[in-house]
Image (cartoon, rainbow, N blue to C red):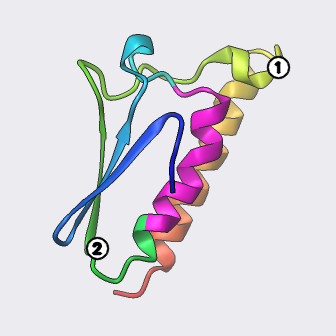
Amino acid sequence: MDYETLLVERDGPVGWLVFNRPAAANAMDAAMMHELEGAWLELDRDPDVRVIVNTGAGDAFAAGLLDAWCSGAGPEAALAAGAALGAEAVAQIGARPR
């Protein structure tokens, strides 16, 4: 699948999920937040991938969440949305068979 803000690569048993907005220090925006779940699931469902490595293109891993993606709702909404996404990602990882 093609992504606007992410690169998804495979190298043997390693799946690479790369935040690809180096001009913005890989700050997460609405598009990236929308794409993340699909990218993680794409790698997770690949039986050849045994580990997923998240990294960032350029000099930064991720500068944080852009308030703009919250439609002006403010930093509290951005923080709550990011925390919810993180909790869901951790829950999905925890639910994986060992």
Secondary element type, mark 2: loop
Image position of 52 (left or right of 91): left
The residue closer to the viewer here, 72 or 41, is 41
Q: Residues within 10 Å of mark 2 (few under 14, many from 20)?
A: some
Q: Is residue 69 visible?
A: yes
Image position of 7 (left or right of 48): right
Q: Is the residue 31 above or below the residue 42 in the image?
A: above
Which residue in the protein does label 1 denote? 71
Which residue is situated farthest in the front direction here? 2
Q: Residues within 10 Å of mark 1 (few under 14, many from 20)?
A: few
Front tag of 1 and 2: 2
Q: Position of residue 14 (x, y in %)?
A: 21, 64
Q: What residue range appears in magenta?
A: 28-42
The residue closer to the viewer here, 73 or 53, is 53
Report the residue at 39% width, 31% height from top.
Answer: 20
The kind of secondary structure the magenta stretch mainly shows is helix
Amino acid type, residue under disc 1 in the picture = Ser
Report the residue at 68% width, 16% height from top.
Answer: 67
Q: Is residue 35 magenta?
A: yes
The residue closer to the viewer here, 97 or 60, is 60
Which residue in the protein does label 2 denote? 49
The residue closer to the viewer here, 62 or 48, is 48
